[in-house]
Image (cartoon, helix red, strand yellow):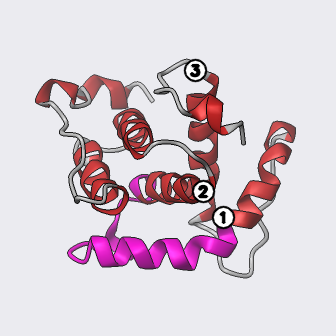
Amino acid sequence: MQDAEDTNSIVSRGDSRHEERVKLMQLIFAHTFLDEDDQFVMVDSDDEQYADFLVEIKKELPEIDQILAIQAPERPLTEINKVDLAIMRLILFEAKHQQTPPKVLVDEAVEIAKEYGTESSPKFVNGVLGKILFTDGTAPQIEENDAPKKDDHESR
């Protein structure tokens, strides 16, 4: 992962930090389909650089998942969209290990949710992470015009 200084600015599409987060989210997403005893195999040689990250986050998933279960009791982990779950796991792991401001993390999570999640993903991710990362329980509000367009998901 990059220096905290690199992560202290808001990341946008096309930014290398954004792209790195997307790649990590995709790896976490893929990992959700493996059995506990399965080893995560890197298919792409570029993925090898993320192997240490996966080992570390796998160790912390029980703690991260417990936090998510407490903050979103109406949605058991097994019922949360796997993309949303991967995004939130990534952001909570980063919140613990980086000095990235919570607003930056939530904004980035919402952007990734808009790109890869469902229509309701940005709002759900924003709400859950906001409860966890903001001490007063508030999170940045998502504007209606920020909602993903249906065409965005059909082209993927």
Q: CA distance from mark 2 to mark 3?
A: 20 Å
Write the residue at 44% across / 56% down: 88
Q: CA distance from mark 1 to mark 3?
A: 23 Å
Q: Is residue 47 visible?
A: yes
Q: Is 17 situated left or right of 123 in this image?
A: right
> Closer to the observer: label 2 or label 3?
3
Where does label 3 land, which residue?
Answer: 15
Where does label 1 land, which residue?
Answer: 57
- What range of the chain is rendered magenta? 57-84
Residue 28: mark in rendering = 2
- Determine contact: label 2, label 1, CB under 8 Å: yes
Q: Earlier in the sequence, mark 1 or mark 3?
A: 3
Residue 131: mark in rendering = none
Horizontal and vertical percent position of residue 146: 22, 27
Horizontal and vertical percent position of residue 127: 24, 54
82 inside magenta stretch: yes
Q: Quadrant of the N terminus?
A: top right
